[in-house]
């Protein structure tokens, strides 16, 4: 079951990477083709916000997977600087 949880969190991380990258590409494409500057800016800022949010949720997800294995402690909570905080 834990392997399944790890696979799911890794799949989520990969999907979020792809989403973030695709949103940035779309914004750049719109910018190059003369799209609305306000929309381009919102997409770029949105991509960054989505990345930050994904990092938070993925970090907590990894924490709970570790907890389910008996490997995480309460002291580990909120470790935004840890390696698992970045996708």
Image (spheres, helix red, strand yellow):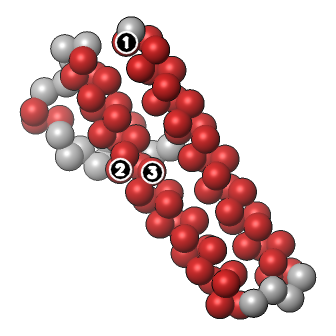
Identified at 52% across, 36% down, the residue is: 12
Determine the secondary structure under disc 2. Answer: helix
Determine the secondary structure under disc 1. Answer: helix
Q: CA distance from mark 2 to mark 3?
A: 5 Å
Label 3 near label 2: C-beta < 8 Å?
yes
Identified at 71% across, 90% down, the residue is: 37
Which residue bears the numbered disc 3? 54
| Disc ID at residue 78 | none
Position of residue 34 in the picture relative to residue 2 (left or right)? right
Q: Position of residue 2 (x, y in %)?
A: 37, 12
Q: Position of residue 7 (x, y in %)?
A: 51, 20
Q: CA distance from mark 1 to mark 3?
A: 21 Å
Q: Position of residue 48 (x, y in %)?
A: 52, 66
Which residue bears the numbered disc 1? 2
| Disc ID at residue 56 | 2
Identified at 28% across, 32% down, the residue is: 63
User: Which numbered disc flags the more N-terminal residue, 2 or 1?
Assistant: 1
Q: Position of residue 4 (x, y in %)?
A: 46, 14
Label 1 near label 2: C-beta < 8 Å?
no
**Labels in figure, total:** 3
The answer to which of 51 and 79 lies nearer the viewer is 51
Residue 69 vertical position relative to residue 26 in the rendered view, above or below: above
Determine the secondary structure under disc 3. Answer: helix
Identified at 50% across, 57% down, the residue is: 51
Q: CA distance from mark 2 to mark 1?
A: 20 Å
User: Which numbered disc flags the more N-terminal residue, 1 or 3?
Assistant: 1
Residue 16 vertical position relative to residue 26 in the rendered view, above or below: above
* Residue 3 visible (yes or no): yes
Residue 64 vertical position relative to residue 44 in the rendered view, above or below: above
Q: Quadrant of the N terminus?
A: top left
């Amino acid at each position: 079951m834990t392997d399944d949880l790890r696979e799911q969190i890794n799949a989520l991380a990969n999907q979020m990477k792809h989403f973030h990258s695709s949103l940035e590409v779309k914004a750049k494409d719109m910018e190059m083709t003369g799209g609305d500057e306000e929309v381009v800016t919102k997409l770029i800022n949105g991509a960054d916000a989505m990345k930050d949010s994904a990092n938070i949720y993925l970090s907590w997800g990894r924490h709970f997977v570790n907890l389910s294995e008996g490997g995480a402690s309460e002291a580990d909570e909120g470790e935004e600087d840890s390696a698992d905080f970045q996708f």
